């Protein structure tokens, strides 16, 4: 072992013993520190796994969505547009879609109503397939209960529930209701030949930009939304919410920094005596600073580990009950979903910089002030 | 775009580093004007004590800056998904004119801080602090660098607009365009490997000579700089294509991605260490003749040369492994 390593080991050894001598005070410090880490870490882990979840969900979405814009609002689109889009080279398929929202006045929730593309998912006339959130919101007591939908006062339409989706796709299907095309047009009174929008799949993702350009030249009144646009918007949204929470936590960090600086400069008489004795027996200023830095390092390490581990449990085992409303938004029918545990080096490094750097910065000057005093002045 | 946690962390580090630099700069001016070890006044004693604080603060800043450099590149890579046209860190750094200058300044600050810490260590070895004036003169030169780094970084993040269409690394690092990046990419893989090998031999020879004879450290520092430049060129022109197993992809940033097992870190960390220690050895050898350092300093310089050579050897091994384990065949 080199002399340097031996010195560090001896310092660590001494510091641990000295920390253990003032157990109560140090445990309080670590606890407060760990709470700061916990708050930030929870926000970061949660936002990161939401970002991951969205990009996983959007992986199967169509590359391009075409909407008709009339007077700045989205309007019903002619089915013939799909054929025109389909003719652009590079587009694998273009299909018109029928979907919309239905406001259920009984429970005050919005459902997404859709005509499925997959023939296996098309329900029989007069029946619907629903996501797990709808029977939950309606409080269905038994399976097979019919669903009554009312579009306006005095109107009532009956649908049989053919089946409900499993909850493993809850993020996407919780509020979803599938109908067949005839029922849909009848229910929403949409004339034949008109659709909500058109989606196109593209074989080579590098060609999306060119296809959008060609399409908007041919159909200038249409709006083209690409999958990466949607993904970027979600990323930014979650980033922004995470950043906002972190900025709010900054007030907490600041308070903690003041607390730490105060604690480091206002040493107890006993600690002062200890440093005085160390200096009297031959430690120089540098050794005392090194010892104090070890103390700060060990406290930081303990608090960081404690904070991240509890934040991990809070987010991934308990679903982040403390922050979820801010980060994921809310709705009457909110999907029940478990987050996939995911932590990466970037998050840990950011977290370390945001919490440990302020702590070290706050304690360095007080440490130096104590360490550089004369032994007799410190002890007096 | 300032409401992103990694960006907030980076700005926090840059802000604290600037504060430290400003305060240390003020102190440095005082030291340069009034430092006198023979003086027994209270003011001199306080100055001597404050040097401890400056050393500690600077060491802390350097550690934080090292972490910030890693975070800066890592974050640029992750943010690429927010910009149209960006596929890795290059696209994010190209979003506005401040991105690459910010990266270069960060690397500059890192090297400057490493060199300063070596000076500091050497200075504390002598009983009479023989290098104090040199040390604080150098510190004054580092202050503007740290401030420029913080300013550029702030400008970079404030001017980050996601509606800008940026360019991908495959556009920047191709032989077809004009510019330094493309010059690097267009050097033939064979020529670039020969040059790298030559630089390696040069480093080994000068290092061996310096260790054997105890002089020629300046030449070794020069060899380290040469090795650094040629190694980066080789990464762009030949090593990256081997890692990607694709002859036309030259990006030196994509190798840092998880898809390529973070292989880039195995290349860059030893390379940066080797260069920093090598240049530092050359710098320290200027002060070998100082009386109070004559005993300990040569040993420190020797250790640095040995570690520097070990760093370059690590880079060489990582390069050889990348080539040997790749399925790409460029030669033969």
Image (cartoon, rainbow, N blue to C red):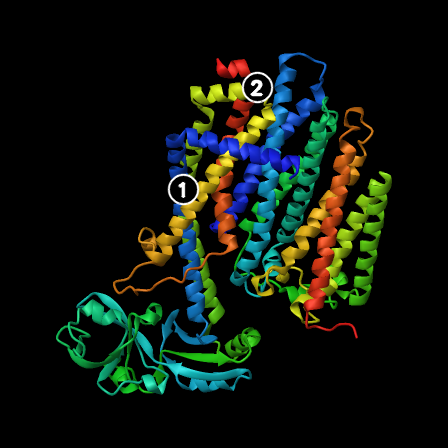
Say which of marks 2 and 1 sits in front.
2
Tags 2 and 1 on a common chain: yes
Task: Decide which of A11, A335 is in the foreground and name it.
Answer: A11
Up-down relation of residue B330 to residue B148 (above or below) = below
Task: Decide which of A191, A273 is in the foreground and name it.
Answer: A273
Q: Is residue A201 left or right of residue A283?
A: left
The percent coordinates of residue B208 (x first, y second) are: 83, 46
Up-down relation of residue A147 to residue B112 (above or below) = below
Q: Is residue B163 left or right of residue B97?
A: left
Q: Identify the residue shown where x is 41% and y is 29%.
A: A22
Task: Tell me the residue that label 2 is attached to.
Answer: A281
Q: Is residue A167 left or right of residue B65?
A: left
Q: CA distance from mark 2 to mark 1?
A: 35 Å
Task: Tell me the residue that label 1 is attached to.
Answer: A34
Residue A362 seen: no
Q: Identify the residue shown where x is 74% and y is 36%.
A: B300
Quadrant where the C terminus of chain B sits is: bottom right
Q: Quadrant of residue B148?
A: top right
Q: Residues within 10 Å of mark 2 (few under 14, many from 20)?
A: few
The percent coordinates of residue A376 (x first, y second) are: 53, 13
Element carrying mark 2: loop
Q: Earlier in the sequence, mark 2 or mark 1?
A: 1
Up-down relation of residue B161 to residue A5 (above or below) = below
Q: Identify the residue shown where x is 62% and y is 51%.
A: B98
Element carrying mark 1: helix
What mark, if any, has residue A24 been given in the picture?
none
Task: Decide which of B185, A268 is in the foreground and name it.
Answer: A268
Q: Is residue A375 left or right of residue A310?
A: right
Chain bearing mark 2: A
């Amino acid at each position: 072992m080199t002399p340097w390593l031996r010195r560090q080991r001896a310092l660590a050894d001494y510091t641990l013993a000295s920390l253990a001598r003032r157990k109560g005070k140090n445990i309080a410090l670590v606890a407060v520190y760990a709470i700061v880490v916990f708050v930030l870490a929870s926000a970061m882990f949660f936002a990161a796994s939401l970002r991951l979840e969205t990009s996983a969900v959007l992986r199967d979405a169509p590359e391009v969505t075409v909407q008709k814009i009339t007077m700045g609002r989205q309007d019903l689109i002619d089915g013939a547009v799909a054929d025109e889009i389909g003719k652009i080279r590079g587009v694998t398929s273009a299909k018109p879609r029928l979907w919309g929202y239905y406001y259920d006045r009984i429970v005050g929730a919005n459902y997404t109503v859709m005509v499925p593309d997959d023939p296996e998912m098309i329900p029989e006339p007069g029946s619907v397939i629903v996501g797990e959130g709808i029977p939950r919101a309606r409080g269905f007591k038994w399976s097979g209960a019919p669903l009554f939908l009312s579009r306006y006062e005095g109107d009532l339409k009956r649908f049989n529930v053919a089946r409900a989706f499993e909850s493993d796709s809850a993020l996407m299907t919780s509020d979803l209701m599938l109908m067949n095309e005839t029922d849909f047009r009848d229910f929403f009174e949409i004339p034949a030949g008109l659709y909500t929008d058109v989606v196109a799949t593209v074989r080579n993702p590098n060609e999306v930009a060119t296809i959008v350009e060609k399409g908007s030249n041919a159909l200038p009144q249409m709006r083209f939304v690409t999958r990466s646009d949607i993904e970027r918007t979600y990323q930014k949204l979650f980033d922004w919410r995470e950043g906002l929470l972190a900025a709010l936590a900054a007030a907490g960090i600041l308070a903690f920094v003041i607390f730490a600086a105060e604690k480091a400069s206002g040493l107890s008489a006993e600690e002062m005596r200890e440093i005085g004795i160390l200096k009297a027996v031959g430690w120089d200023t540098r050794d005392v600073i090194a010892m104090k830095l070890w103390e700060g390092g060990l406290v930081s390490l303990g608090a960081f580990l404690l904070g991240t581990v509890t934040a991990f449990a809070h987010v991934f085992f308990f679903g982040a009950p403390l922050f979820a409303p801010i980060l994921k938004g809310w709705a009457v029918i909110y999907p029940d979903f478990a987050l996939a545990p995911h932590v990466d080096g970037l998050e840990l490094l950011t977290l370390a910089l945001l919490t440990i750097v302020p702590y070290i910065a706050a304690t360095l000057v007080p440490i130096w002030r104590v360490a550089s005093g004369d032994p007799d002045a410190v002890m007096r | 775009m300032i409401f992103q946690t990694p960006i907030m962390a980076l700005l926090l580090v840059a802000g604290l580093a600037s504060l430290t630099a400003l305060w240390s700069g003020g102190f440095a001016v005082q030291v340069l004007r009034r430092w006198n070890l023979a003086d027994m006044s209270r003011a001199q004693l306080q100055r001597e004590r404050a040097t401890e604080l400056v050393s500690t603060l600077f060491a802390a800043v350097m550690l934080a800056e090292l972490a910030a450099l890693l975070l800066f590149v890592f974050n640029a890579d992750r943010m690429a998904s927010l910009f149209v046209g960006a596929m890795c860190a290059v696209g994010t750094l190209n979003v506005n004119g401040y991105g690459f200058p910010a990266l270069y300044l960060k690397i500059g600050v890192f090297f400057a801080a490493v060199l300063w810490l070596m000076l500091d260590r050497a200075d504390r070895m002598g009983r009479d602090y023989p290098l104090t004036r040199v040390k604080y003169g150098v510190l004054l030169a580092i202050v503007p660098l740290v401030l420029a780094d913080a300013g550029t970084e702030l400008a970079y993040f404030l001017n980050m607009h996601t509606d800008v269409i940026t360019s991908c690394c495959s556009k920047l690092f191709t032989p077809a365009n004009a510019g330094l990046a493309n010059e690097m990419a267009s050097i033939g893989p064979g020529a670039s490997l020969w040059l790298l090998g030559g630089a390696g031999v040069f480093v080994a020879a000068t290092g061996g000579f310096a260790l054997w004879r105890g002089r020629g450290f300046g030449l070794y520092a020069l060899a380290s700089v040469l090795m650094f430049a040629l190694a980066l060129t080789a990464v762009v022109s030949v090593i990256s294509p081997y890692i990607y197993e694709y002859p036309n992809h030259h990006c030196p940033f994509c190798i840092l991605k998880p898809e390529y097992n973070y292989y880039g870190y195995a290349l860059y960390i030893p390379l940066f260490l080797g260069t920093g220690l090598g240049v530092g050895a050359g710098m320290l050898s200027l002060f070998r003749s100082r009386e109070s350092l004559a005993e300990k300093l040569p040993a420190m310089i020797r250790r640095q040369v040995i570690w520097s050579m070990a760093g370059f050897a690590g880079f060489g091994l990582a390069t050889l492994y990348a080539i040997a384990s790749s399925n790409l065949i460029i030669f033969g």
